[in-house]
Image (cartoon, rainbow, N blue to C red):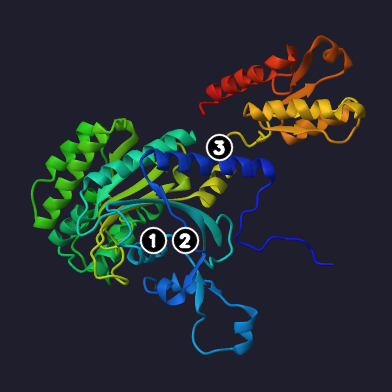
Amino acid sequence: MIKPRTPPGVMELLPREQIAFQRMLDTIRRNYERFGFLPVETPVFELSETLLTKSGGETERQVYFVQSTGALAKEGDGLPELALRFDLTVPLARYVAEHEHELTFPFRRYQIQRVYRGERAQRGRFREFYQCDIDVIGKDALSVRFDAEILAVIHAVFSDLGIGDFTIQLNNRKLMRGFFEAQGVTDGEQQALVLREVDKLDKRGADYVRETLTGEGFGMSAEGVDRILDFVAMRSSSHADALAKLDALGQGSEIFDQGIAELREVLDLVKALGVPEEAYCLNFSIARGLDYYTGTVYETQLDGYPQIGSICSGGRYEDLASHYTKSKLPGVGISIGLTRLFWQLREAGLIAGSDESSVQAMVALMDEGELAESLDIARRLRAAGINTEVQMEGRKLAKQFQYASRAGIRFVVLAGEDERARGAVTVKDLLREQQFEVKREELASSLKVELEQARALAGR
């Protein structure tokens, strides 16, 4: 007999946790749509030549290829024809290039689907996981105004998720490039290597980073390294402070000044969009996607749980689909890796509602001869928008209550002979551990009031 077990690198949830996960997906989708983003889905596999145009290094070693048993039998030369997508960006690039003449630009798309990577099996790393992406794609050009709107979407999503206070951190790659060039670090690869060392500040300390950058392999001056460390340590504490810090940078090269101007415009528009100033700040240490992002970059952290790391990231890029079309398609977007985020939140005890069921009421079966009565009550509840289950087999009432409690169902509806004679039902509220009687025609409205009160108290 085969032992039942899940393969490593996947997250498989029990029903109530799956309900909590699904609610997070629904919240993200709802907020994406509120801002006017349109849904897109692409196949789970793409042509290998499409996926591998952008990859290289570690990514290429993590690709899962797809082969039928028939193709395996032929043992053809070269790579398999198909591969599982490892992110949603490459499929988006192919999608936009393929449907370019059918889309309206700027094209605002959201995509919530699973992706696959051959990660080394370890705690908290997944080979199959959900990404929740939005992007705005322009044709030839795209205003920096969209960069501000993306930040407003991030704020709306995480406010609605209700997982704690968070801060959206902003930087601009043009500003970074201009600053590093002024320090004599002009090569892109060299900048990436320097920033990789700077990224070790929190773990190894400033002395370690200073010693590395002034030592063999980098050979930077102590003064230059100190200027870099001072620069990347810069954070803003308010909207006014962010603008003041940008002003204090003065002027530099053309690319440096562009970065400052773009950040200032984004900050002004973010304020106009109504995002509270405590929810965002400048952070000049953000250096994500050095070989991809060209302007604004975002990282979002939970204030009380910095060890979780970035819970949402992204930025501005210059040309989405250069491998597939001659058209210039600049864009800006973000991604939420929801599977890993959910796992981390669960580990930290921050998942709300995982004790709840999506079933809100259960109609008990008190007498085998009254099944039709129970079914009619359930039908009326469902018509009123209340998710309802019926006990279809007769068993002791205590067992039915035990079932509802273990399943996380809040209300148990009882319609015995006495209740039927009075045209009423009895409702057992397992959450409040209370019982009340209500007229049968008022049952649905009464339960809806209770459920709305619970949602209001939970902030949902």
Task: Describe residue 238's horizontal placement relative to residue 367 as left or right.
Answer: left
Q: Earlier in the sequence, mark 1 or mark 2?
A: 2
* Placement of 233 over or under 190, stated as above or below: above
Count of marks overlaid on the render: 3
The answer to whether residue 302 is visible is: no
The answer to whether residue 449 is visible is: yes
Question: Cβ–Cβ below 8 Å for labels 1 and 2?
Answer: yes
Question: Cβ–Cβ below 8 Å for labels 1 and 3?
Answer: no
Give me the C-alpha separation between circle 3 and circle 2: 32 Å
Residue, disc 1: 92
What numbered label is drawn on residue 42? 2
Q: Secondary structure at mark 1?
A: helix
Give me the C-alpha separation between circle 1 and circle 2: 8 Å
Q: Secondary structure at mark 2?
A: loop
Residue, disc 3: 350
What type is the residue that disc 2 sits on? Answer: Thr
| Residue sitting nearer the eye, 377 or 390 | 377
What type is the residue that disc 3 sits on? Answer: Leu
Give me the C-alpha separation between circle 1 and circle 3: 32 Å
Query: Measuring 74% from the left and 16% from the top, which residue is drawn there?
Result: 440
Query: Measuring 57% from the left and 19% from the top, which residue is drawn there?
Result: 453
- For label 2, the crowd category at 10 Å Cα-Cα, with few meaning under 14, some 14 to 19 and many 20 or more, is some
Image position, residue 290 (x, y; %): 29, 61
What type is the residue that disc 1 sits on? Answer: Leu
- Which numbered mark, 3 or 2, is in the foreground of this view? 2
